[in-house]
Amino acid sequence: MVLARRMSLISPSPTLAITAKANKMKAEGINVIGFGAGEPDFDTPANIKEAAKKAIDSGFTKYTPTSGTKELKEAVCRKFKTDNNLDYSPAEILVSCGAKHSIFNIIFALCDDGDEVIIPSPYWVSYPEMVRVAGGKPVFINTTQENNYKITPAQLEKAITPKTKILILNSPSNPTGMVYNEQELAAIAEILVRKNIYCISDEIYEKLVYDGQKHISIASFSENIKRLTIVVNGVSKSHAMTGWRIGYAAGPKEIIQAMSNLQDHSTSNPSSISQAASVEALTGPSDSFKVMFDAFLKRRNTMVDRLNAIKGFKCLKPQGAFYVFPDVSEILKKNFNGKPICSSLALAEILLEQAKVAVIPGGVFGEDKAIRLSYATSDGNIAEGLDRIGKFISSLA
């Protein structure tokens, strides 16, 4: 079988083997604590599920317009106005099968062969793969824990070339949980406007921001940056609706139309039932969100404190999302079974095998000195999992 050349550009995820092994161990009855989850461990709120049931019972089970229902796009417009002080019309909104699908559509609509796309590192694993399969070239800006894993204006200026087309900005960040503040965003916006570079602003973790920090959309600074920005969001993380697969993008009408044309010939519309549920998510009561938010805040504090108490871990307190991204460079210098551990993947494999704890190696996010742990799991799992990690790390030479 001869596959298309583009398939050789996509790297298989090194985490798949770890995930498969963890699942196999669980199926064999082994008690594995998983810190890999990229989704809330809470159930979708009852009012949202009821809206979906009502849609089914009323026969709302047919095709909708590719770009989304009128009701959902209007609800998205109201959300942007209320939450982000951004004015969009329904013609500037595209609803897709998850925020990942939204980003895929944007990259394919904007990125020509050879175009450079700037991606701050650490990054969400799918960004560079999407760019490569679209024919573009990922250009990474490396950040450090000392700089809170955020790019500086000087770094951005230096990375820009005549081929630069897009900057992908993710705040709050997966995997680091860091949030760009108003001053940092304003400086980035000024450069993008001056250089006429598009921005994909991935704001899927917008609602999960802690310690008095405020989420600000880069598109809200001026009309000039707004015309260059495509904002991506969705209901997955904020409303515990990962499986419902609803994301959305807002941006200039011409770009949104191009994305819609692409979606016409790929997936067509997202699920009609999920769209009805998402209208309720964006317009209905949100009492259940506070319960989830408070739980994540408590778990974050516990996990950061516990990890920093383990010798060899150096963990920043994330400002958003539900991940921690501790530096483990000191642990990578240690030996296990007479051999240096050396890589985050090796450490993840050893922790799974020896401590029965599943974590995500930082190398897949572009930072091999770290690992990612999700605190979207129970207090009991966090306590037990960190006990296991601490006990194992203390045994290393």
Image (cartoon, grey):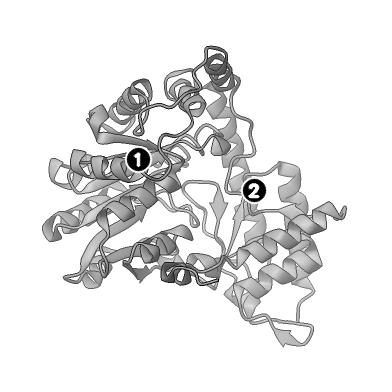
Q: Quadrant of the C terminus?
A: bottom right
Q: Quadrant of the N terminus?
A: bottom right
**What's the residue at 43%, 63% (across, down)?**
129
**What's the residue at 40%, 38% (across, down)?**
268
Secondary structure state at the residue bearing disc 2? helix
Relative vertical location of residue 316 with respect to residue 395 in this rendering, above or below:
above
User: Farthest residue toward the bottom?
Assistant: 338
Secondary structure state at the residue bearing disc 1? helix
Name the residue nearer the viewer: 94 or 349: 94
Label 1: how many Cα within 10 Å (few below 14, some 14–19, many 20+): some
Where residue 201 appears, x then y in whole percent? 32, 48
Q: Is residue 31 visible?
A: no
Q: Nearer the viewer, mark 2 or mark 1?
A: 1
Disc 2 to disc 1, how far (Cα)?
A: 46 Å
Q: Is residue 216 left or right of residue 239?
A: left
Q: Which residue is mark 2?
A: 302
Q: Is residue 94 visible?
A: yes
Label 2: how many Cα within 10 Å (few below 14, some 14–19, many 20+): some
**What's the residue at 32%, 50% (across, down)?**
106
Identify which amino acid the numbered label 2 is placed on.
Thr
Where residue 265 appears, x then y in whole percent? 36, 44
Where residue 249 appears, x then y in whole percent? 33, 40
Name the residue nearer the viewer: 322 or 233: 233
**What's the residue at 49%, 69% (across, down)?**
3
Which numbered disc, 2 or 1, marks the residue that appears first in the sequence? 1
Q: Which residue is mark 1?
A: 264
Q: Is residue 132 left or right of residue 15?
A: left
User: Farthest residue toward the front?
Assistant: 1
Relative vertical location of residue 172 with respect to residue 348 in this rendering, above or below:
above
Name the residue nearer the viewer: 266 or 170: 266
